[in-house]
Image (tube, grey):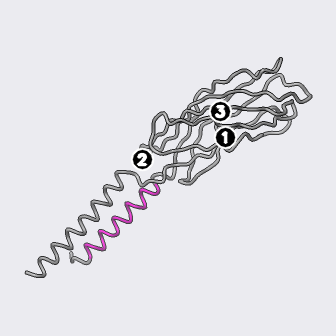
Amino acid sequence: MTFRRSLLLGAFVSCSLLLAGIDARASYTFSTGTVTATPASVSGVSETFTPLAGTVATDTSVNRSLVTITYNGLPATAVGPFSQTLSFLETLSSATTGQTEVLSVNGTLTVNSASTSGVSAAFAINSITVVSGSGFTLQSTGYATSTTNVAVADLGFNIIPPSLVPEPTSVAILGSGLFGVLGLALYRQKKRA
């Protein structure tokens, strides 16, 4: 094999590895842990917090609902405002790259108006603390009513994946580049001799 063909093959391998690194982070999962909260503080009203999980098939930021809240025993006429403090762990992971992030989310949910016809509220993040992980982040996008005529709504968040080429691929690409430089040096030395 000629030196020129070797360089072309090296470039092809490097590009393939780089594209594989991009594809590797193009899918990840999210999973919400148990939600703890203060009571709704409205007489006769209770709530159920349902943690959500799913798979995201993109390497860009995406808005997802992480928690569904169902209010039970709301009256026909609106009640409020009332506030609740929420706390839960969020796990984000990429099976391909092995990157996993565990975040502790704490915030205040303020319900301005609530009845059997719907819920109007705002969710303020007090803190998002990294428990362990390697690059995923969360942004609060507020509290969005997901359905009408029932007292159900979701907590929405913007999931931001790490914008890094996975480490094994980085090492492989670096190795390919060093191999090419070494080959070029040997070629020039042989040509001078």
Q: Quadrant of residue 87?
A: top right
The circle drawn on residue 97 is: 2
Give x and y (percent) for residue 106.
61, 31
- Does dot 1 land on a helix, a strand or a loop? strand
Q: What's the magenta region?
A: 5-23
Crowding near the residue tagged with mark 1, few <14, some 14–19, many ≥20 C-alpha atoms within 10 Å? many
Measure the alpha-carbon separation of dots 3 and 1: 15 Å
Q: Main secondary structure of the magenta part?
A: helix
Q: Relative to 175, is 66 on the left or the right? A: right
Q: How many marks?
A: 3
Q: Amino acid at mark 1?
A: Ser
Q: Amino acid at mark 2?
A: Thr
Front residue of 109/151: it is 109
Q: Relative to 23, is 155 on the left or the right? A: right
Q: Amino acid at mark 3?
A: Gly
Q: Residue at x 22, y 76 (%)?
A: 3
The circle drawn on residue 144 is: none
Give x and y (percent) for residue 69.
72, 31
Of tags 3 and 1, which is closer to the observer? 3
Q: Quadrant of residue 14?
A: bottom left
Pointer 3 or 1: first along the chain: 1
Measure the alpha-carbon separation of dots 2 and 1: 24 Å
Q: Is residue 156 above or below residue 22?
A: above
Find disc 3 in the rendering and name its residue. Answer: 107
Q: Is residue 129 magenta?
A: no
Pointer 2 or 1: first along the chain: 1
Q: Residue at x 31, y 74 (%)?
A: 8
- Does dot 3 land on a helix, a strand or a loop? strand
Give x and y (percent) for residue 164.
44, 53
Q: Is residue 7 magenta?
A: yes
